[in-house]
Image (tube, coloured by chain):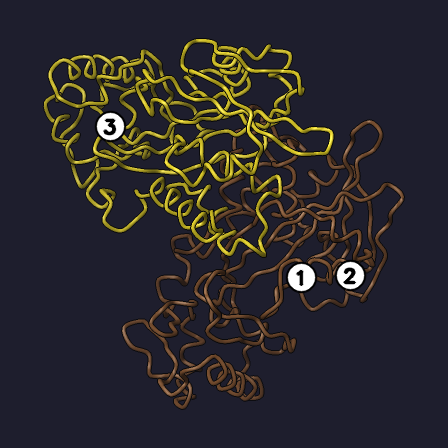
Chain colours: A yellow, B brown
């Protein structure tokens, strides 16, 4: 693919994954979700109107702010009241994302270094625009000549989200109270059968952050990125059935694939970050170099 | 230094280097500098009031926009008219930054991949908040045990900006019409006597972007970052006198120095990016990990 077409396609991906920042997004009409007067998310209008049916949990929206009833004054009370409400909502409403209920608790906190103020079911976080964190692992090899190849996963055709698309070797969301390293080792083991002793050699190298909206809600996410150089004779194998296949591709083929629609979008961003850090993109021949970098690191103030 | 104190100090640095984005910055009262109806900079009020004295160059400010007279309709005409005006202004006004005239032409363009619409004297770019690009090089060594040390420069005590502070091994601004690679090799040679054959092994790995304001103007900058692993027996030596000394420090000492006031601020950001990419910061023990990353990649829309 010509360089210009590649750049344009990848910039489009970055814009799509950051569409919440663009003029015309729902941001202007979202309510701020505040706990203890600190913002922890963004709630789209179609969700706000549903929440008014639960006055025992949410105060009436005021000045563009949605907050919990004052009696919900602890981590436990907030989490349980919202969870009960979501379980009821799941029965009664047509909010599609709640159909993907996962029984995974995510921490709700203003920023990653704040103490969590509650937990929330993973599937509901996008209704509240609550920031989610995850881990993505670039598994790669270097041959005798120094040539880099990358292991990619092909997602299972029956997976709820992005079925059949290409993905990083392993990835997963950060559940409440679990460390980044633990999540990394667990996902490497479960998804790709990477032994813990090998997965622990993965190196933390960056984050990739973005916020997009779709008809379901607001997805504000940061992924902790790890690089794991694998022995040449190691082959990841299917673990929990979330993956249908693994393939090892020369890095230049992986780069070409970024500009197709065959990649899970946030995983494509993680690969783009790998390409930049490993010098597979040259600032003198890639005029959008700086935009490619900054598109990987957008966060809401 | 305790981890928490280190993080807080480094986050302060990132906030200071991005203070143009903060509430209370001059951004709200700056005029947009437009050429051909496309914004290329931000002009603070104290500069706008000076420009009105040159009606042959600037149209009267309107709706918060400053633009050039319509007769200045080409790259050459714009550049020459503004340059003549700046040379006159330099004699007549008290704008301190013009005293630092460098005779270096910087490209003015909406983004790095657009065709430049004019050039401007480097010392004047902050008056117009025109985006500037540069190159910074991390020179480092790895010993037999895999331990990383970094070469730092101590800036000359007589240097116009940031005298006596620590800096990356080599760095320099990108002049109009010059490639990133050329600038890299030139600065490595001039500042640190690194032979071209060695400098050319430097690897492009990222950008670092930020916008700050001070009493002189608006500094919107992106630095192309390169890593250069040096042979253990190589020692950079003083070239053009911009540096008084080079020292090789274990990377953990370099990390500690980031939290002092001994570093040129944007060079400290380049080192922080190195620490992140080379896994010297751990997301499980550094709670501000994600904020450290995103603070390195802010850009004006």
Which class describes the residues within 10 Å of circle 1: few (<14), some (14-19), or many (20+)?
Answer: some
Label 2 and label 1 in one chain: yes
Q: Label 3 near label 2: C-beta < 8 Å? A: no
Nearer-N-terminus badge (2/1): 1
Which class describes the residues within 10 Å of circle 2: few (<14), some (14-19), or many (20+)?
Answer: many
Chain under disc 1:
B
Residue B216 drawn above or below residue B230: below
Residue B5 drawn above or below residue B162: above
The image quadrant where one finds the C terminus of chain B is: bottom left
Residue A82 is situated, as x and y percent measured from the top left of the image, at 24, 17
Task: Tell me the residue that label 3 is attached to.
Answer: A127
Residue A7 drawn above or below residue A195: below
Give B260 or B172, whichever is nearer the viewer: B172
Q: Is residue A85 left or right of residue B179?
A: left
Residue A163 picture quarter: top left
Task: Tell me the residue that label 2 is attached to.
Answer: B191
Residue B272 is situated, as x and y percent measured from the top left of the image, at 62, 42
Report the Cα–Cα distance between label 2 and label 3.
54 Å
The image quadrant where one finds the N terminus of chain B is: top right
Task: Tell me the residue that label 1 is attached to.
Answer: B172
Residue B210 drawn above or below residue A152: below
Report the Cα–Cα distance between label 2 and label 1.
9 Å
């Amino acid at each position: 693919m010509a360089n210009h077409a590649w750049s344009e396609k990848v910039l489009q991906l970055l814009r799509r994954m950051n569409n919440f920042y663009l003029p015309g997004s729902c941001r202007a009409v979202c309510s701020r979700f505040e706990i203890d007067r600190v913002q922890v998310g963004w709630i789209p209008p179609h969700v706000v109107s549903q929440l008014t049916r639960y006055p025992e949990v949410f105060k009436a929206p005021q000045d563009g702010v949605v907050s919990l009833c004052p009696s919900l004054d602890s981590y436990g009370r907030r989490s349980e009241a919202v969870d009960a409400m979501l379980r009821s909502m799941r029965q009664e409403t047509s909010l599609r994302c709640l159909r993907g209920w996962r029984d995974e608790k995510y921490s709700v906190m203003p920023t990653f270094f704040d103490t969590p103020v509650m937990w929330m079911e993973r599937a509901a976080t996008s209704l509240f625009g609550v920031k989610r964190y995850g881990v993505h692992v670039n598994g790669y090899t270097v041959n005798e000549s120094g040539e880099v190849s990358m292991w990619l996963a092909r997602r299972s055709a029956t997976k709820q989200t992005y079925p059949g698309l290409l993905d990083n070797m392993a990835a997963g969301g950060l559940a409440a109270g679990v460390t980044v390293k633990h999540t990394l080792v667990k996902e490497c083991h479960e998804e790709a059968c990477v032994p813990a002793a090998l997965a622990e050699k993965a190196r933390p190298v960056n984050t990739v952050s973005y916020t997009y909206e779709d008809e379901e809600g607001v997805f504000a996410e940061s992924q902790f990125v790890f690089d794991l150089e694998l022995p040449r004779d190691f082959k990841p194998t299917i673990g929990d059935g979330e993956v249908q296949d693994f393939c090892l591709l020369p890095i230049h083929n992986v780069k070409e694939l970024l500009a197709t629609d065959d990649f899970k979008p946030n995983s494509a961003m993680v690969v783009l970050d790998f390409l930049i850090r490993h010098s597979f993109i040259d600032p003198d021949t890639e005029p959008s170099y700086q935009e490619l970098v900054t598109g990987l690191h957008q966060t809401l103030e």
